[in-house]
Image (cartoon, rainbow, N blue to C red):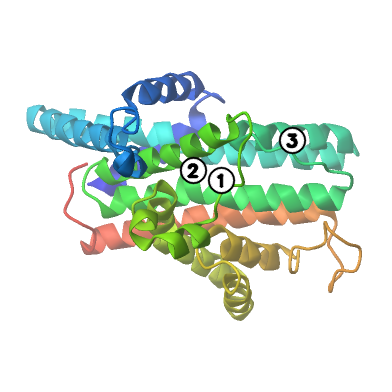
């Protein structure tokens, strides 16, 4: 069953050396770019907003039929393929290692090395560059970014792998996320980039085009996993505070799963509203940065273990979709 493949992958992932799949990810990213088709250049500009679906569907169909072939040949091969896809996507150990390193640097009083590690971590993920001047700012950016990574590199992957038979759901999620990253890279590569429209602006301009966009599909795919993760955080901390933080953040973030989830996590680790990086008049006194990072790391670990435990219970009860290993 799918849960067994997930458990095997989760154990193997903790034993793999850091960056074991980095070369593979870069190679597949280049291959995905070769699969892209410029519909505008082919004389169909009105369908250009749909061209990102082409590599997504090719990978989805390829993974589905390959898994079916391997499973029909020998079930163990199908299971091994599922484990391999999971190992490609899961990066929970990387998150834990980065948080541990930052915490160690701060314990040693080496703020500058901690800042350098956070800056490289952020830039490696989405190319963003932040200016960090105080430990409080470092903690803010680390937790805010760590929540997003935890969702997109573990919890959402686990959810879609368990909910869709075989690795098809996982492959679809990974490709949609890659399409969003690729869209942002293409926008940033423009010589004179115009201001990028938000999802709310796209929705107001054309609901049909917004529904077909990679960003909206990713938002839909993460809608339930983000809420389940927020619920898990609330159960492990204060559920009432988590619900309040979610509602307040959601008021101004209609098409965002990250903003309310981050607000919930901020409250759980003692960062309050998360504005301590911007001013020195936070509503509540901030804990020491090291304690906040330790709380965040432990919180994510507990959430991961709780999800595995719930998955085991659901698998034993037979409440998961009937899927091969």
Q: What residue lies at 15% left-to-right and 28% top-to-bottom?
A: 70
Residue identifier under label 2: 153
Q: Label 1's element?
A: helix
Q: Quick one: 218 or 78, which is closer to the camera?
A: 218
In this picture, residue 116 sits left or right of residue 76: right
Q: Label 2's element?
A: helix
Q: Residues within 10 Å of mark 2 (few under 14, many from 20)?
A: some
In this picture, residue 133 sits left or right of residue 26: right
Residue identifier under label 1: 149
x, y (%) of residue 205? 44, 61
In this picture, residue 80 sits left or right of residue 18: left
Q: Quick one: 27 or 206, which is closer to the camera?
A: 206
Kindly report which numbered mark, 2 or 3, lies closer to the viewer in this rendering.
3
Q: What residue lies at 61% left-to-right and 42% top-to-bottom?
A: 194
In the depicted structure, whether residue 251 falls above or below residue 185: below
In the depicted structure, whether residue 107 falls above or below residue 257: above
The Cα–Cα distance between marks 2 and 3, rounded to whole angstroms, is 19 Å
Is residue 225 in view? no
The residue lying furthest to the left in this view is: 72
Q: Are marks 2 and 1 in contact (CB under 8 Å)?
A: yes
The Cα–Cα distance between marks 2 and 1, rounded to whole angstroms, is 5 Å
Q: What residue lies at 57% left-to-right and 26% top-to-bottom?
A: 18
Q: Which disc number belongs to residue 119? A: 3
The Cα–Cα distance between marks 1 and 3, rounded to whole angstroms, is 15 Å
Q: Are marks 2 and 3 in contact (CB under 8 Å)?
A: no
x, y (%) of residue 86? 37, 37
Q: Label 3's element?
A: helix
């Amino acid at each position: 069953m799918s849960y067994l493949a997930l458990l095997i992958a989760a154990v193997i992932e903790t034993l793999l050396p850091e960056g074991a799949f980095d070369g593979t990810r870069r190679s597949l990213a280049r291959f995905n770019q070769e699969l892209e088709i410029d519909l505008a250049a082919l004389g169909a500009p009105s369908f250009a907003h749909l061209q990102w679906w082409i590599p997504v569907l090719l990978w989805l169909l390829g993974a589905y039929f390959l898994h079916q072939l391997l499973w029909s040949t020998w079930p163990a091969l199908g299971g091994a393929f599922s484990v391999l896809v999971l190992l490609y996507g899961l990066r929970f150990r990387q998150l834990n290692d980065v948080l541990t390193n930052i915490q160690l640097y701060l314990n040693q009083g080496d703020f500058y090395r901690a800042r350098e590690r956070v800056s490289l971590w952020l830039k490696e993920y989405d190319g963003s560059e932040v200016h960090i001047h105080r430990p409080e700012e470092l903690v803010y950016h680390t937790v805010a970014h760590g929540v997003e990574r935890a969702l997109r590199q573990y919890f959402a992957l686990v959810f879609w792998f368990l909910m869709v038979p075989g690795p098809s759901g996982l492959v679809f999620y990974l490709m949609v996320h890659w399409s969003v990253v690729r869209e942002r890279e293409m926008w940033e590569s423009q010589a004179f980039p115009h201001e990028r429209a938000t999802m709310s602006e796209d929705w107001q301009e054309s609901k049909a085009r917004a529904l077909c966009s990679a960003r909206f599909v990713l938002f839909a795919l993460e809608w339930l996993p983000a809420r389940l993760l927020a619920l898990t955080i609330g159960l492990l901390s204060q559920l009432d505070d988590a619900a309040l933080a979610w509602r307040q953040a959601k008021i101004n973030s209609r098409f965002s799963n990250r903003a309310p989830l981050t607000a919930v996590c901020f409250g759980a680790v003692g960062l309050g509203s998360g504005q301590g990086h911007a001013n020195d008049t936070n509503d509540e006194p901030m804990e020491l940065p090291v304690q906040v990072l330790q709380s965040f790391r432990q919180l994510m670990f507990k959430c991961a273990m709780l999800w595995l435990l719930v998955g085991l219970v659901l698998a034993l009860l037979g409440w998961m979709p009937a899927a091969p290993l």
